[in-house]
Image: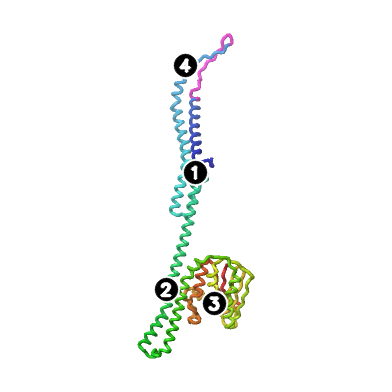
Amino acid sequence: MKKMKLFPKTFFYTLGLMLFIVGIAHLLLYLFTKPEWLVISVSPHDELSLHTSLNVTDYVTQTVLRALPLSLICCVIISISCSFVFSRKITVPIKQIGAVTEQMARMERDAACKISSKDEIGILADNINHLYQSLLSAIESLEIEKQRVSESERSKADFLRAASHELKTPVTALNATLENMILGVGKYKDYDTYLPECREMTGRLADMIHDILETSKAGMSAENEEAVETDLSEMLSSMCEPYMLIARTKGIDFCLELPDSFEAVLPPQMFGKAVSNILANAVAYTEPGRTVSVYFDRRDILIENECVPIPKETLRHIFEPFYRPDFARDRDKGGNGLGLYIVDTLLKTMNIFYSFCPMEEPQGMRFIIHL
């Protein structure tokens, strides 16, 4: 019966109830109208004859009339009992569904319709469960997307604040120098000395503005670039060539160990820009006589440079925009503090995990890109 649909199940329940009531009614009528006073006699000629001592018709009529109230009461009681069982069988699953949907309306995560029948009510319960799980999944996805958008907006706001603060200092210095030159204050009368300095300041400002604009477009460009199958061995080999020349000029050993081929699906230009920034930092912060190494470990790309390890407190902020460690506060030596921020932005946009940690032997820093 569990596998039957609702209509035939209802039909057979009702038919069985009616047949049961009719059968009970006829059985009671039969029991209460059975003749009891019969006299049997045998004639001299051995002929069997039946004689009754009362009027059968009147007896049956009186008996039926006397039995009808009791039969009616019994049938009503039986009908009420059967109807109760039948109604409960039909309505209990619907009540269960109603109670569970109230729990679902309150967003209780463990709410579920536990109905085992295979009819329309069971199918309805399964559909409600599936719909609720889909709703929970959609809500979770929206929450994750909301958090991602909030983090992105917060990151953009932090970047704009940091950029405005970073631009404020050179603009103020340039403005003060030009104003003193215009007013002819003291040493600023020497235009031949301070005009080149002003030009140098404007050049640094132009470079910084260019870097800021490139950084702001980095995440968007990574999202728009299509991921394709790329031979990373070939890509890294060509990317490392200019840095090997720079390292040789500075007296740094550049060790490159790559497999013949290593295929990966990723946006090549954005990935190349991220790796290029890592290589630039590795060469910039390695002293002469030390080593920069680039190699694969299974599906990880490792870029190592021998240097003084960065303290843990500094590592917490190293990927923040415009952050420069104490040993690299000079813009000429420490850059503008956007290199690793761009690396972080690009790798996160491409959903590529990474780690940046100190090495003990030899001392230095290791950047690992997990593919």
Mark 3 Cα shell of 10 Å, populated few (<14), some (14-19), many (≥20): some
Q: CA distance from mark 1 to mark 3?
A: 67 Å
Alpha carbon of mark 1 to alpha carbon of mark 2: how far?
A: 60 Å
Q: Which residue is mark 3?
A: 280
Q: SS of the residue at dot 3?
A: helix
Please give the name of the residue rendered at 57% of the width and 78% of the height, measured from the top-left corner: 242
Q: CA distance from mark 1 to mark 4?
A: 59 Å
Q: Nearer the viewer, mark 4 or mark 3?
A: 3
At label 4, the amino acid type is Asn
Residue labelled with disc 2: 161
Q: Which residue is mark 4?
A: 55
Q: Give the foreground label among 1 and 4.
A: 1
The reply to whether discs 4 and 2 touch (Cβ–Cβ < 8 Å) is no
Contact? badges 1 and 4 (CB < 8 Å) = no
Q: Position of residue 253 (x, y in %)?
A: 61, 80
- Label 2, label 3: how many angstroms apart (C-alpha)? 26 Å
Q: Amino acid at mark 3?
A: Ala
Mark 1 or mark 4: name the one nearer the start of the chain: 4
Return the disc, 4 or 3, that comes first in the chain's sequence: 4
Q: Secondary structure at mark 4?
A: loop
Amino acid beneath label 2 = Arg
Q: Earlier in the sequence, mark 2 or mark 3?
A: 2
Which mark is drawn over residue 120? Answer: 1
Image quadrant where residue 170 sits: bottom left
Range of magenta residues: 30-46
CA separation in Å, label 4 and label 2:
116 Å
